[in-house]
Amino acid sequence: MMRLDKFLSEASPYSRRESEKLIRRGAVTVNGETVSKPDAKVSETDEVRINRRLIVYRKYIYLMLNKPQGYLSATEDKRDPVVTDLVPEDLRHFNVFPVGRLDKDTEGLLLLTNDGNFDHALMSPKKQVTKRYFAILDKPAEPADAGLFAAGMDLGDFTTKPGKLEISQDDPTHVFVEISEGKFHQVKRMCEKVGKTVLFLKRTAIGALPLDKSLKPGECRELTAEELILLQNN
Ligand code: URA
């Protein structure tokens, strides 16, 4: 059980103070009855409405973002725009943060959540969730490069786990890379190690979850229940 004003401030876009005002004004019903006391106790399963609109209680949200270039994988920065600037207004109060990070100039699938356990489950090195990327290189990749990716690479400060490099049949400067770690600049550094510079990088999947192709860069949406299950089964 929790106070009605707290329930609303967590589950709706309204702040605690705004929720209190709405309650006092008689705009809030609980199981069909108007409740005008902000400290009235409600539970997560009560049917709470503001001006007849149903407010479903949720503590956590999970978003899929198609990250555009130019945004930092952070929640605030003095100079650059950050990925949480792209969260729709009505979901801002959930205070999501990025799950792992993509470089400022990398595009594609980035998950955002306010659930620390989810973040840990996906990012923990023990889990080794595969991340898939599409990259455009400055020179054609060669079949021998795939062998070097598969063997694991010594990058000086660490040796990578085996990765996967697939070369596009149509254009050998277009490659698909899979890695199960997420070290800083890892894809770019692995490509550099085989003598190619990454000109464009986009993450296309995390584990069994592909980026929704209908999301334009900068757009995000909540994960469906099925997608969450896909990620949990990684
Ligand atoms: N590897 C990189 O080099 N950059 C990214 O943003 C992600 C993986």
Image (tube, rainbow, N blue to C red):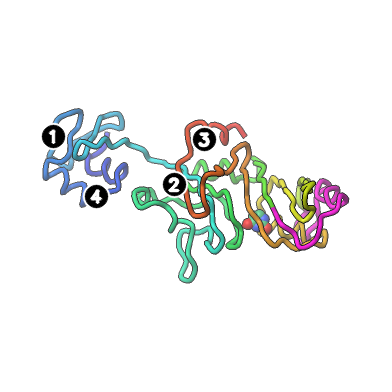
In the rendered view of the protein, which quadrant contains the N terminus?
A: top left
Nearest-to-viewer mark from 1 and 2: 1
User: 10 Å neighbourhood of mark 4: few (<14), some, or many (≥20)?
Assistant: some
Tag 4, which secondary structure?
helix
Asked if residue 156 shows in the view, the reply is: no
Name the image quarter holding the C terminus. Answer: top right
Q: Which amino acid type corresponds to the residue marked 2 in the rendered image?
A: Asn
Q: Which residues are magenta?
A: 135-159
- At which x and y percent is residue 25? 11, 45
For label 3, the crowd category at 10 Å Cα-Cα, with few meaning under 14, some 14 to 19 and many 20 or more, is some
Residue 209 has which mark?
none
Q: Are marks 4 and 3 in contact (CB under 8 Å)?
A: no
Labels 4 and 3: the sequence-earlier one: 4
Depicted 203 relative to depicted 105: above or below: above
Q: CA distance from mark 4 to mark 2?
A: 19 Å
Q: Earlier in the sequence, mark 1 or mark 2?
A: 1
Mark sitting earlier along the chain (2/3)? 2
The alpha-carbon separation of the residues under discs 2 and 3 comes to 14 Å
| Kind of residue at badge 3 | Leu
**Mark nearer the viewer, 2 or 3:** 3
Quadrant of the image occupied by residue 59: top left
Quadrant containing ligand 1 reads bottom right
Q: Which mark is residue 16?
A: 4
Mark toward the start of the polypeptide (4 vs 2): 4
Q: Which residue is mark 1?
A: 34
Which residue corresponds to mark 2? 114
- The answer to whether marks 3 and 1 mark residues whose Cβ atoms lie closer than 8 Å is no
Q: Which residue is mark 3?
A: 228
* Disc 3, SS: helix
Give the residue displayed 21% in from the left and 51% down from the top. 18
Residue 232 screen position, x and y as percent: 56, 34
Please indicate whether residue 69 sits to the left or right of residue 176 in the image. left
